[in-house]
Amino acid sequence: MITFKNVSKQYDDGTTAVKQINLEIHEGEFFVLIGPSGCGKTTTLKMINRLHEVTDGDLYIKDKRVVDHNIHHLRWNIGYVLQQIALFPHMTIAENIAVVPEMKGWKKQKIKARVDELLTLVGLDPKQYRNRKPSELSGGQQQRIGVARALAADPPIILMDEPFSALDPLSREQLQQDILALKEKIKKTFVFVTHDISEAMTLGDRICLMKDGGIVQVGTPEEFIQQPKNEFVQSFIGNQGSMLVETLERFVKESDQSELSEAGVQLKSSATVMEAMNLLQEHDAVAVYKGSKQIGVVTRKNLLAFLSAKTKEGGTL
């Protein structure tokens, strides 16, 4: 779907932000770019929609180089959600969502239906929110509108640049839940930048860890835990690795079990958190059994809360 072939990015001052990276992002996957500040992850993301131009090498979407696309058509077909939500303050929520469909010449009735569909998809009642202004919404609600706007013209690719990092912990956790649910419903190709390892581990089908403009390791969360390439990877994962191989019995004891729910998928209490995480890519909840007795449940919500708490206990990554 998206292919980097020996791609580099050098700025006019001589700084090399990205150094000859080779990368394949598959159609329909949730791909996470992560790494310390200044590692090149955001530059890599922005080369996809040509907010930064490639200096050397070739970057393809499907079989066509991005530089051969009309830049406006390219961006119309790539949704973009960033940390600074950048909604137009003088426009209503409906008008904000409708920007790209209007540019593409959609009919008014089709736009209205799409706006209502997307507001419902991101958990906001169209009747209540479509005529409000951005200033009337909370930060979390505004970010939901940012996601809806990125999806408005039904683009095949969604880029998300640290979209939740400015939010309070509760709003961030809820939006992570929303994105997990959303990615199962809409089957787009997501490229997501974050500095939060628990967020990467929970959301990503695959993760690309970068350092000093280069790629250190690409793989599934499980591969990062079980086969870290070097000490840098082990250090960056931190205590996430040890927590993900903990048993579900310990998880149940230490996590919030106040919202027990029915779960058709079952695991033994001796199974690991990582095994439950893998099942949560396709199921809403996993029941945990000790013998014949259910002792708890793993959901996306309590897994995210658990990993977030353990990251804070272990310090900032």
Image (cartoon, rainbow, N blue to C red):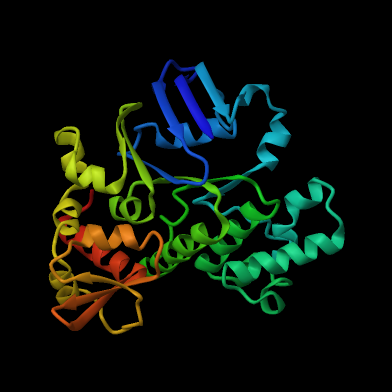
Q: Position of residue 175 (x, y in %)?
A: 46, 64
Residue positioned 24% across, 43% down in the render: 224
The image quadrant that residue 311 belongs to is: bottom left
Vertical placement of residue 175 versus 82, above or below: below
Tell me the quadrant of the picture where the N terminus can be found: top right
**Residue 123 pos. (x, y %):** 57, 72
> Which quarter of the picture shows residue 61?
top right
* Quadrant in the picture for residue 31: top left
248 vs 46, left or right, is: left
Q: Give the residue at x 47% y 53%.
A: 163
Direction from residue 263 to residue 296 in the image, left or right: left
Q: Residue 92: in sight, yes or no?
A: no
Q: Nearer the viewer, residue 36 or 148?
A: 148
Q: Nearer the viewer, residue 150 or 30?
A: 30
Residue in view at x 64 percent, y 77 percent: 125
**Residue 78 visible in the shown view:** yes
Instruction: Name the outermost residue toward the front.
Output: 292
Residue that appears at 17% across and 48% down: 238
Q: Position of residue 107 (x, y in %)?
A: 86, 56
Q: Position of residue 81 (x, y in %)?
A: 55, 50
Q: How many marks?
A: 0
Question: From the viewer's perspective, is 145 left or right of 22?
Answer: right
Which one is in front, 94 or 121? 121
